[in-house]
Image (tube, rainbow, N blue to C red):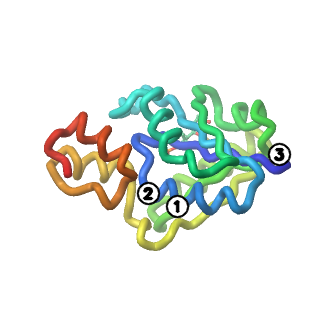
Amino acid sequence: MKTAVYPGSFDPITNGHLDIIERAVRLFDKVIVAVARREEKRPLFSVTEREQLVRQVVTCFPNVEVTSFSDLLVDFARRMNADIVIRGLRAVLDFDYEFQMVLLNRKLAPTVDTVFLLPSEKYFYLSSSMVKEIAALGGAVSCFVPPAVLAALKSRYPVCQ
Ligand code: PNS
């Protein structure tokens, strides 16, 4: 039984994240989507809201579990009996940050490995922060996020479409 953890802030989950989850469920027996608490980043949605939104949009995947964590990623992964961490890699922009994280995580826990998955190229430019910025300024985000997330964004930014 191969279990992988897909961690992130998911503030909020986008179609790009969903694309990665769709790929991951084909590769692993169980995928745990792990919402990082990260209050220091002043997220738009609380950890409970982010977790609920993820839960709502992954119901079609029987082998996906959703939870949150507030400790070190590698400690969380080991607690879940997972030795694989999944990260989505978009453009070169992500590379430095992801490279640093994978090497530090490897130093902390040599048995936990990171697998990078590439989303469809139509999501290469997509990020939660851009979605929030567009939503806050009244732009259309319905093509970037699932309907449940759009509704949540509208509750924060009534101007968004
Ligand atoms: O979606 P994000 O914000 O890029 O996700 C980053 C995340 C949550 C995966 C990363 O910050 C993380 O793993 N945080 C947990 C704390 C931790 O383990 N930090 C050390 C990383 S080397």
Tell me how far mark 2 sits from mark 3, CA to CA. Answer: 30 Å
Callout in the foreground (1, 3): 1
Q: Amino acid at mark 3?
A: Thr
- Is residue 68 shown above or below 144? above
Provide the residue designation for mark 3.
Answer: 111
* Disc 1 to disc 2: CB gap under 8 Å: yes
Tell me how far mark 1 sits from mark 2, CA to CA. Answer: 6 Å
Provide the residue designation for mark 2.
Answer: 15
- Is residue 80 shown above or below 137? above
Provide the residue designation for mark 1.
Answer: 19
Residue found farthest to the right: 1
Q: Element type at marker 1?
A: helix
Callout in the foreground (2, 3): 2
The foreground one among 123 and 147 is 147
The foreground one among 21 and 83 is 21
Give how far across and how far down residue 63 sits, in percent.
70, 48
Instruction: Report if residue 104 is visible in the image.
Output: no
Give how far across and how far down residue 30 sits, in percent.
73, 47
